[in-house]
Image: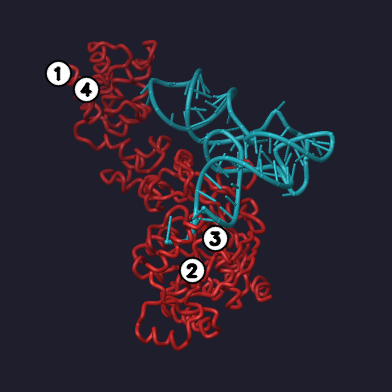
Amino acid sequence: MAQDLRDLMGGPRVRMAPSPTGLLHVGLARTALFNYLFAQKEGGKFILRIEDTDRERSDPKFEKDIVEGLQWLGIKWDEFYRQSERIAIYTQYLEKLLKESKAYYCFCSEDELESKRQDQMSRGEAPKYNGKCRELQAAEVKKYLAENKPSIIRFKATSKKVMFHDLIRGQLEFDSSLVGDIAIAKDLATPLYNFAVVVDDFAMKITHVIRGEDHISNTPKQILLQEALDFPQVQYAHLPLILGPDRSKLSKRHGAVSVADYKKDGYLPETLVNFMAFLGWNPGGEREIFNLPSLVKEFSLENVQKSGAIFNLKRLDYLNGFYIRQKSIKKLAELCKSYLPEADQSELEKIVGIYQERLKKLSEIKELAGFFFQDKLVYDKELLKWKNMTDKEISQSLDKSENLLSKIKEASWTKENIEKVLMPEAERVKDRGYLLWPLRVALTGQKASAGPFEIAAISGKEKTLKRIQNAKLKMQNNN
RNA sequence: GGCCUCAUCGUCUAGUCUGGUCUAGGACGUAAGGUUCUCAUCCUUAAAACACCGGUUCAAAUCCGGUUGAGGCCA
């Protein structure tokens, strides 16, 4: 009932709830993206909640990374919370459960629990807490607490069938007797994951929980908690996992997984957004290029896949190349600046102009165009050879280029003029490569590059002629 | 080990709910060709999949049952 009212009042409310214990990885970013798309599409709100109650493992630097990563991707949130600032709320509900005897203090030691667990596993049973401290007398509890005996707070899980409707998977059913009495807090001021989630989802009026499939088994626990606290049940949607090439959950051992890594490598945010959206989702048509606003338009949980999706780097590269090609020269130059700090603005724009269609990642500009800024090119003499040219022919070819080019006036040193002068000569032989290949290698030192005319134009007359001379020297000195 | 989930080209997927129009479509990747000094871009073409078994039906990728396989959670 309260739920319906909320829906009426402001559309769905969804959240992403990362714990700041690591960099923002693509799985998390994709969950955020789906939540964001859903909220936008349905006219709801997207909430970012930092789950930092685990003091030892949480670190503000990770929170910063998560926040910056999402901003970079263009995923905006409407509200922001930090669990560490909400302790009083959890304490209040913890006390309530304790008072109503729906939760109790447990004084079992780690070792004790571990051996029980082993026991149960070896007998083929589900490992769960045996409820030893459930029936402790109030006086006893008081005494242990006064003695500072180590304890945690457990929730009395009722044995029943827990059912819920998953928006992606349909009706799901669990036997809660297999769960046992779950730990919900280390103490009154330190709530544990499942409990804090339930309290916050209620307090923040969350209507839909959209999260990874790895949380399916947490769901019945959270539902039990909701019931005990008299909270309405939220809607669930469990997203398929992002997988590594070996089909296991994508993790660090598969290589780069953090959004920051991809950013550093020169992937564009629009690439990542487009790519991540299509991991486990598809709008149905044949269009595959979508920006954030158009994704919002098309998005629907109904089109979310049930099975895991492998993170395909090749496809990511292709998409990134595509988006790089869409950029204006000016914008692209700006993006490449940090990878090629030696270049000034106008140089950079020219360079980026000829390498735009060759870039898969921004960082590659360094490898591709670094030669422009080297004093002396280092390459093997053999590289100057096109097909079966002799050393003599190579020298002659370079001579020819040098002669023709030196005739061009400094002021008319443009790509068009260079081409006009060289092309007729190149076409006199059956294969243009005899003139153009040695020239291009002399100018770049690379076996693959942009065309010689464009490179000569950017390099300038002086540098161009000098590099041709250096190549000739190489031929003479045989090195 | 227990519980849970999933299953269409190598990969992401369309089609599955509402069986026939599916000789299963698209994209990445791969291969061949064209453009080209090289690389890249662009264009053309090709190879490439309904996990298996059984059932329902005139008809099944599509519905049902099972098997197998893969994954997730629990420590």
Q: CA distance from mark 1 to mark 3?
A: 72 Å
Q: The C terminus of chain A lies in which quarter of the figure?
A: top left
Which chain does the residue under circle 4 lie in?
A
Residue A297, given in percent of the width and then of the height, sits at 62, 54
Please state the chain letter of the residue tagged with numbered disc 1 in the rendered image.
A
Q: Which residue is mark 3?
A: A217
Q: In terms of image quadrants, where is residue A433? A: top left
* Residue behind mark 1: A477
What kind of element bears circle 4?
helix
- A40 sits to left or right of A151: right
Q: Which mark is residue A471?
A: 4
The local secondary structure at tag 2 comes to loop
Q: Tell me which label, 4 or 3, sits earlier in the chain.
A: 3
Q: Are marks 4 and 1 in contact (CB under 8 Å)?
A: no
Depth check, mark 4 against mark 3: the one in front is 3
Please report, as a chain letter, where disc 3 is located.
A
Disc 4/disc 3 C-alpha distance (Å): 67 Å
Q: Are marks 4 and 2 on the same chain?
A: yes
Q: Nearer the viewer, mark 3 or mark 2?
A: 2
Q: Which chain is cyan?
A: B
- Taking the spot 46% from the left edge, 55% from the top edge, the residue there is A73
